[in-house]
Amino acid sequence: QVQLVESGGGLVQAGGSLRLSCAASGRGFGGAAMGWFRQAPGKEREFVAAIDWIGSSTNYADTAKVRFTISRDNVKRSLYLQMNSLKPEDTAVYYCAARRAGTGVPTTTSQCDYWGQGTQVTVSA
């Protein structure tokens, strides 16, 4: 079982930056690929970015390419999402997710085995 706790969300003006963090604990973290998803009010949860266990392979949604960077520090058992040039349409609850080792990088919600509680990101115009 892997427990995930996000932090770093908040209110920022358009054009600003935020860095989200996700702290992992529990057994099962070793080898797990991880990702970030987000859910805006009235919309389905959507994929943002994902990274494999060793950090050599990343995958981004088109909306996140160029502006967002996913990274991880396995020693610290942490996942990060650097978000730059934020837009009002980036407003959402951002979730950290993990997929069991050996099952690939998660790009859909159904591929994720563990979820955090989410952190709110609000971008004002």
Image (cartoon, helix red, strand yellow):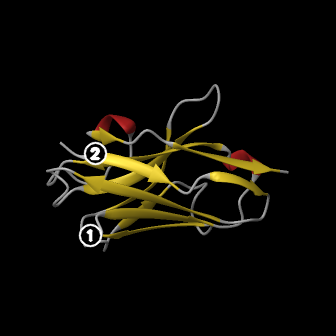
In the rendering, which numbered label is found on residue 49?
Answer: none
Query: Residue 3, which numbered label?
Result: 2
- Number of numbered labels in the structure image: 2
The image shows residue 110 at horizontal and vertical percentages of 33, 34
Please give left or right for residue 99 compared with residue 48 in the image: left
* Residue beneath the point at 16% across and 54% down: 101
The location of residue 118, given as percent across then percent down, is 48, 42
- Label 1 amino acid? Asn
Front-most of residues 109 and 125 = 125
The answer to whether any part of residue 39 appears in the image is: yes
- Residue at horizontal 54%, vertical 30%? 44
Residue 125 picture location, percent across and down: 85, 51
Instruction: Judge left or right: residue 71 versus residue 65.
Output: left
Determine the secondary structure under disc 1.
Answer: loop
Task: Please state, as top left, top right, bottom left or bottom right, where the N terminus lies in the image.
Answer: top left
- At numbered mark 2, what does the secondary structure look like: helix, strand or loop? strand
Does residue 70 sit above or below 90 in this rendering?
below
4 vs 70, left or right, is left
Look at the picture and state if 98 lies above or below 114.
Answer: below
Task: Bin the neighbour count of mark 1 within 10 Å (Cα to Cα): few under 14, some 14-19, many 20 and up.
Answer: some
Query: Residue type at mark 2?
Result: Gln
Q: Residue at x 67, y 66 (%)?
A: 17
Answer with left or right where residue 24 lies relative to residue 60: left
Q: Is residue 112 visible?
A: no
Residue at position x 24%, y 65% from top?
A: 53
Callout in the foreground (1, 2):
2
Q: Could you tell me how far apart the alpha carbons at marks 1 and 2 are, in whole angstroms?
A: 15 Å
Q: x%, y% of residue 31?
A: 17, 60
Which residue bears the numbered disc 1? Answer: 74
Q: Observer-nearest residue: 4 or 56?
A: 4
